[in-house]
Image: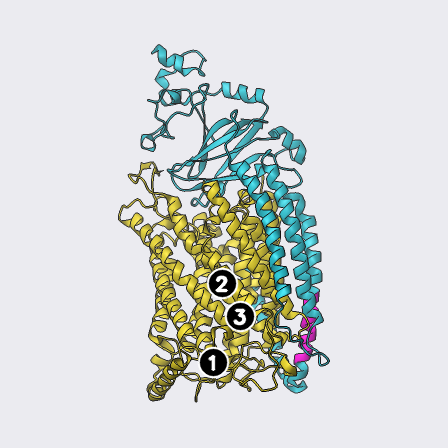
């Protein structure tokens, strides 16, 4: 298979030479089929979405921190949604909903997988490009279309979707239930449908490429862990996103064609609805059958990249390569079998619930293996704290903190108390929000030199890291206490609640820190765009002394990646500190006197 | 004006950071990039250690500030909730230990094994023995947590004792309604298609069982020490009955009734003394996003002694008479509408 891949690769290579001179601005930067350019497109679109989604959180944190105050500039910005400088509840919920949707799907799915799967898969497995560059290009443009539709929904008169990112019907199905459930919700669903198409086109391509286009010698067990992680991510996406697509289509039918898939026994705004026999819980099953794997779609790439960056900068092999692959495989399988742990309090059969408790807590085992393996990777290393490395260490810290609270929530008895409180908000923000963002930042800092041929500014990078990690803990750690007091999430104002109003001061503190952390992210964005044009030029092809194949390409690889032959691979990706050598790249043949370990 | 100044200040801070960042690049070129890198490495290793130390102190300080505001100090207000508290403590102990050990190792390793010219990284690619150890131990610990958790779960979600009082809880945008059985201990049938005007819950008054049912809005009265079974449903979108003091929560789903039961341990008056808060109230929060008024969907539970509860109940009028006021008896005997109906 590998030799066939090489032949195919050579074919692409020749074609590339013929095409090279015809490249126009449009084919190079807009409708590009080069996986590296598509990766940059995903990354930059993701960054723009992250700024929007992050800014939304700043606005609604303003309301949570200062429920009594008015901000006249909000009215200038949002018009009637902030009458008299006071954010209206309808729009508060719209902001919360869009914050979730944008960050989960547009940033941490498309922005993360889209960027790094596109960028790293061909470069690290030794391929000229993706299996289908055309589908790859379409994948980006469907994402772009989804983005346009979602963005335009922000401007419709009745406001964007406001039923939470989980869009549970009947709230999301009935325009009478909430103004965000009018046209804004249709746009949300159509946009998600486009998004899912994009994700499927991408995912199929990633899987095909990894399975068929590895260079000679690159057996599956020699793949860098990033590629394994991206592979499992793609498999999860391809198997679970279509289920959400079906849910979205059925919901569109319920909204517009009078069907009753999710509706029954409803009286709203004084009207008795004719819908009978549907079940709102059915939607939750369809949603979470994607929704839970989605958590791992977000997390696995971060795990893979952090593993790679930890090993490279500790100058040590990743500890327990096979265990790392095995535990990712276990996580991927279990990801499909735990979705109903989001539904313990829906009236789910308790006996059925018990299976989901067991399977959910089982995920802690592969997660524990990964954590201990990361720790052992650092042990007796010779660690360089590049910005990427700091974020990778931050990722491990966040993954531990957020992962452990999953043990609370996965236990159904405890979930009775903690479900839909700030404990949940703290848990998932730490484990899939902050941890994945840290993984993504680690990736951006580590591969920026390969992407743009320049370095990011280190001082700004370090400031970015330190504000982010300290800020993230200051924001989310105290939220656990609010959750233990039963404080519900998605509330616009707590001041009328005897049970929750004592957290007013804390909410204010959290809001202030959130604003500082947001500003630090803007610093990163500035650093990113500034360095693309003005950053220090990369002078060596392998600035980190890394083993993987992307560092065997020229500093600015063209379409086709390697000017000559694709290098052949003779070893795994983690031969650091072996036989007294600091690192041995994958394309270096095994020497006669080299020791073999196990 | 204030906003403008704030923005100006923000831009200024950015500009300063940017200038410093740019200057540091020139400095590093002058001093030699390798030297700068080594210096940065030392600073960051030190900061990571600092993060660990201040992080652990901060976690302790945070606990000091907010532990008193969680529900632990006042204890569970329901008998069943005590199992949940016990489970919480066990889980906190287990995860707390793992948290401290792994975070300390992570940052300590990072600090201790920072790059140094005198050290070579140690080639250590795997060890089946170690990996087996840290697969087995978490598996055993988790099995224990699962067993304890499921024991509590089955107890709490199991059938309520026979003497349980039944209260029907109905959510709608954005308030709670409660229906009591009346003397016959049976809730009358409902049909959402009958919802009209005063009959806001759609009760079917052709069912004799519904004639003595009592409907109250906003506040639920229950006696202390007796199991209460809530039959929960919703009229419009999904809501959730969140009663954190009792450690309970159950969704209200249109078309699919759910149930939950608990035994209140303390009366509202007792809780006022326990918490030292004269305004203490058992509140029902809606815990499932239900629309623009979600945050204001507040209900109140008053837990009282059996005598108080019976007295309160006897003062309530059957819903039948609010729906059909012309059939209300002239006398105050409102608790036995069957007699009144039979007399018609």
**Label 3 vs label 2: CA separation?**
16 Å
Q: Chain of mark 1?
A: A
**In the image: residue B157, left or right of residue A35:** right
| Label 3 sits on residue | A305
| Label 1 sits on residue | A217
Relative depth, front residue between A154 and B85: B85
**Does residue A70 show up?**
no
Residue A329: assigned label = 2
Mark 3 Cα shell of 10 Å, populated few (<14), some (14-19), many (≥20): many
**Residue A335 in the image: x percent, y percent?**
47, 57
State the extent of the magenta-drawn residues as a range. B37-49
Q: Quadrant of the N terminus of chain A?
A: bottom left
> Which residue appears at 35% of the width and 52% of the height?
A247
Which mark's residue is nearer the viewer, 3 or 2? 2
Residue A456 in the magenta stretch? The answer is no
Tell me the quarter of the picture where residue B226 sits.
top right
Residue B41 in the magenta stretch? The answer is yes
Relative depth, front residue between A77 and A13: A13
What's the magenta bit mostly, secondary-structure-wise? helix
Circle 3: element type: helix
**Residue B215 in the image: x percent, y percent?**
44, 26
**Residue B256 in the image: x percent, y percent?**
39, 38
Which mark's residue is nearer the viewer, 3 or 1? 1
Disc 3 with disc 2 on a shared chain? yes
What is the drawing colour of chain A?
Answer: yellow
Protein image colouring: by chain
Residue B326: assigned label = none
Q: Spot the residue most to the left.
A: A257
């Amino acid at each position: 298979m590998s030799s066939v891949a090489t032949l195919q690769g050579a074919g692409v290579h020749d074609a590339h030479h013929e095409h090279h001179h015809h490249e126009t601005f449009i084919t190079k930067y807009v409708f590009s089929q080069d996986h590296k350019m598509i990766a940059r497109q995903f990354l930059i679109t993701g960054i723009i979405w992250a700024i929007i989604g992050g800014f939304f959180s700043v606005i609604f944190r303003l309301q949570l921190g200062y429920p009594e105050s008015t901000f006249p500039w909000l009215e200038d910005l949002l018009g009637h949604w902030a009458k008299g400088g006071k954010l209206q509840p309808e729009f508060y919920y719209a902001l919360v909903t869009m914050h979730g949707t944008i960050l989960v799907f547009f940033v941490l799915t498309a922005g993360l997988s889209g960027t790094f799967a596109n960028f790293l898969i061909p470069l690290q497995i030794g391929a000229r490009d993706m299996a289908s560059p055309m589908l790859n290009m379409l994948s980006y443009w469907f994402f772009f279309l989804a983005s346009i539709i979602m963005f335009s929904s922000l401007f419709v008169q009745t406001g964007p979707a406001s039923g939470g990112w989980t869009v549970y019907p009947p709230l999301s199905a009935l325009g009478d239930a909430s103004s965000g459930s009018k046209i804004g919700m249709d746009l949300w669903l159509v946009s998600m449908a486009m998004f899912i198409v994009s994700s499927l086109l991408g995912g199929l391509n990633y899987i095909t490429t990894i399975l068929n286009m590895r260079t000679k010698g690159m057996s599956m067990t020699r793949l860098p862990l990033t590629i394994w992680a991206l592979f499992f991510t793609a498999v999860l996406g391809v198997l679970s996103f279509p289920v959400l697509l079906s849910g979205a289509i059925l919901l569109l039918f319920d909204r517009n064609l009078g069907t009753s898939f999710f509706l029954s026994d409803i009286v709203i705004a004084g009207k008795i609805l004719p819908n009978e026999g549907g079940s709102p819980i059915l939607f939750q099953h369809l949603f979470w059958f994607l929704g839970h794997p989605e958590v791992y779609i977000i997390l696995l790439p971060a795990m893979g990249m952090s593993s790679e960056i930890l090993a490279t900068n500790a100058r040590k092999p990743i500890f327990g390569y096979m265990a790392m692959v095995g535990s990712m495989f276990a996580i991927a399988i279990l990801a499909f079998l735990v979705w109903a742990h989001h539904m313990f309090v829906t009236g789910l059969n308790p006996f059925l619930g018990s299976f989901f408790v067991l399977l959910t807590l089982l995920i802690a085992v592969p997660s524990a293996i990964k954590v201990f393996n990361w720790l052992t990777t650092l042990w007796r290393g010779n660690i360089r704290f590049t910005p990427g490395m700091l974020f990778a260490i931050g990722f491990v810290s966040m993954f531990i903190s957020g992962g452990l609270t999953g043990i609370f929530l996965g236990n159904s008895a405890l979930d009775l108390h903690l479900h839909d409180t700030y404990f949940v908000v703290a848990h998932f923000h730490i484990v899939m929000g902050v941890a994945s963002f840290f993984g993504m930042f680690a990736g951006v800092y580590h591969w920026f030199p390969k992407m743009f041929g320049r370095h990011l500014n280190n001082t700004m990078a370090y400031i970015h890291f330190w504000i982010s990690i300290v800020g993230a803990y200051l924001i989310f750690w105290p939220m656990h206490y609010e959750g233990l007091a039963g404080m519900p999430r998605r509330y616009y104002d707590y001041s009328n609640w005897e049970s929750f109003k004592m957290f007013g001061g804390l909410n204010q503190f959290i809001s202030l820190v959130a604003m500082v952390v947001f500003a630090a992210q803007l610093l990163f964005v500035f650093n990113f765009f500034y360095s693309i044009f003005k950053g220090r030029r990369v002078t060596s092809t392998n600035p980190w002394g890394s083993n993987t194949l992307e560092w065997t390409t020229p500093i600015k690889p063209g379409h086709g990646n390697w000017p000559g032959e694709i290098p052949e691979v003779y070893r795994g990706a983690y031969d650091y500190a072996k036989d007294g050598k600091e690192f041995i790249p994958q394309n270096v043949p095994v020497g006669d006197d080299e020791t073999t370990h196990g | 004006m204030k906003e403008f100044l704030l923005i100006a200040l923000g831009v200024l801070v950015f500009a300063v950071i940017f200038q410093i960042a740019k200057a540091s690049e020139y400095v590093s070129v002058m001093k030699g990039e390798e030297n700068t890198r080594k210096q940065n490495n030392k600073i960051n290793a030190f900061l990571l250690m600092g993060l660990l130390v201040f992080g652990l102190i901060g976690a302790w300080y945070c606990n000091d500030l907010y532990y008193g505001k969680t529900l632990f100090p006042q204890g569970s207000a329901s008998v069943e909730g005590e199992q949940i508290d016990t489970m919480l403590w066990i889980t906190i102990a287990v995860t707390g230990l793992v948290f401290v050990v792994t975070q300390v190792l992570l940052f300590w390793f990072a600090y201790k094994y920072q790059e140094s010219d005198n050290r070579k990284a140690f080639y250590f690619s795997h060890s089946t023995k170690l990996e087996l150890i840290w697969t087995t131990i978490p598996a055993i610990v988790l099995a224990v947590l699962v067993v304890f958790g499921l024991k509590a779960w089955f107890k709490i979600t199991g059938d309520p004792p026979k003497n349980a009082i039944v209260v029907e809880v109905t959510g709608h945008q954005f308030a709670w309604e409660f229906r009591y059985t009346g003397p016959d201990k049976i809730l009358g049938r409902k049909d959402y298609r009958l919802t009209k005007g005063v009959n806001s819950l759609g009760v079917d008054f052709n069912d004799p069982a519904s004639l003595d049912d009592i409907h109250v809005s906003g506040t639920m009265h229950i006696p202390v020490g007796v199991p209460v079974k809530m039959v929960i449903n919703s009229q419009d979108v999904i809501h959730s009955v969140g009663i954190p003091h009792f450690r309970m929560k159950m969704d209200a789903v249109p078309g699919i009734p759910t149930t939950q039961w608990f035994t209140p341990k303390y009366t509202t008056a007792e809780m006022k003394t326990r918490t030292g808060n004269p305004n203490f109230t058992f509140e029902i929060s809606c815990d499932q996003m239900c629309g623009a008024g979600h945050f204001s969907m507040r209900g109140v539970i008053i837990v009282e002694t059996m005598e108080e509860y019976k007295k309160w109940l006897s003062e309530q009028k059957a819903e039948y008479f609010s729906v059909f006021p012309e059939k209300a008896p002239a006398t105050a005997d409102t608790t036995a509408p069957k007699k009144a109906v039979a007399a018609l």
